Amino acid sequence: MTSHPSRRDFLLAGAAALPLAGQPVAQGSHFTAPAVIIPPDSPPTVVASANGIRGVARAMELITQGVDTLDAIVEAVKIQELDPEDNSVGYGGLPNADGVVQLDASCMHGPTKRAGAVAALEGIKTPSEVAKLVLRYTKHILLVGEGAQRFALQFGFRIENLLTEESRQAWLRWRANLNPDDNYLDVPSGERFPTPPTGTINCCAVNARGEISSVTTTSGLAWKIPGRVGDSPIIGAGEYTDNDVGAAGSTGLGEANMKVCGAFLTVEGMRRGLSPTDACLETLRRVVATTEQRRLDPRGRPRFDLTFYALNKRGQYGCASMYAGYRAGHFAVHDGSEARLVGFAHLYEGEPPS
Ligand code: GLY
């Protein structure tokens, strides 16, 4: 897991004696956050959802050249945003109920403690870049809709058609099957999407100086009500970074995550000393506990998937998904040796019940 095993081993061996930020440092003392800064010099590590396997390689390449962690991970997720084959992100993303692609993205930069986000952005292929511009060049954090688009145009972006032929055909099939009493003929059942797909890419990175960043970008829930905004552009839900502790992000059903501010909760879990994987699992249990009845099956299992990715300041990483079958059970990692897919933890076997 490291190209500097002795340094990493030293850090891990010392972890028990090294209280994480937020832990009580003496009996009777008050919590202070953060209480302890982890020594820098850990090997760089990049973590992403499984569709970020090319991205973690690109981010690591840039980070080892000295590029800032946020700049590196935005370049990583842009690979998916610009890929017409990824129908969950950017160009080629599945559209809303009107057949219009609306994109959400957010990012955080640990060293400068800044955040930026855009929501319901139309016509711009790379919303992660626009979110980074909000972070870097404004006093605001979140721009939405037409204002976000005008902001992007001011920075030289062009309005483009984000709907690929494949996504347009998928939307037409969904619309035809939506209502048996409307004027569209149903298409054969084998051609329809049984449930509205969610996609998204999250990417988090730490460099050798312990500088951490996170980014999440998505086209959101397919066939959503126009104007619907998911978890991805919400700081603390879709992603979160605290440079003293680590970063976390999510993919999956945004509505389930937003009620628990899952990325923030996961970072807070790590602050209390949980491993990244255990912090993700704890957040998933909270999600289940806060899920309304209509989204649960008779056994109390969620009818949706949701996955959290986490990385701490030492470069330790983890991921946990609601269901084992999500994205073939993997997430993407580069910890200095190579980009690879790693199995994640899960709460339930199989796929979400319908
Ligand atoms: N997690 C992506 C969305 O729900 O929009």
Image (spheres, grey):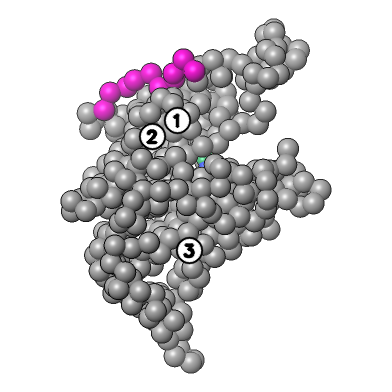
Label 1: state its secondary structure: loop
* Residue receiving disc 3: 276
What residue type is disc 3 on?
Pro
> Where, by quadrant of the figure, is residue 210 drawn?
bottom left
Q: Amino acid at mark 2?
A: Gln
Residue 150 left/right relative to 303: left
The crowd level at tag 1 (other Cα within 10 Å; few <14, some 14-19, many 20+) is: some
**Which residue occupies 35% across, 68% down?**
314
Q: CA distance from mark 1 to mark 2?
A: 6 Å
Label 3: state its secondary structure: helix
Using a 10 Å C-alpha cutoff, classify the residue at mark 3 as few (fewer than 14 neighbours), some (14 to 19) or many (20 or more): many
Name which residue lies at 51% across and 48% down. 330
**Is 161 contained in the magenta span?**
yes
Q: Is residue 282 magenta?
A: no
Q: Are marks 1 and 3 in contact (CB under 8 Å)?
A: no
Above or below, 188 against 33 in this view is above
Q: Which residues are magenta?
A: 157-166
Q: Earlier in the sequence, mark 1 or mark 3?
A: 1
Which of these two is toward me, 8 or 20?
8
Q: Earlier in the sequence, mark 1 or mark 2?
A: 2
Q: Is residue 194 left or right of residue 343?
A: right
- The residue under label 2 is 80
- Residue 247 seen in the current view: yes
Q: x, y (%) of residue 263? A: 48, 56
Return the residue at label 1: 86
Q: Are marks 1 and 2 in contact (CB under 8 Å)?
A: yes
Question: Cα distance, mark 1 to mark 3?
Answer: 27 Å
Q: Indicate left or right for 180 with 145 as reference.
A: right
First along the sequence among labels 3 and 2: 2
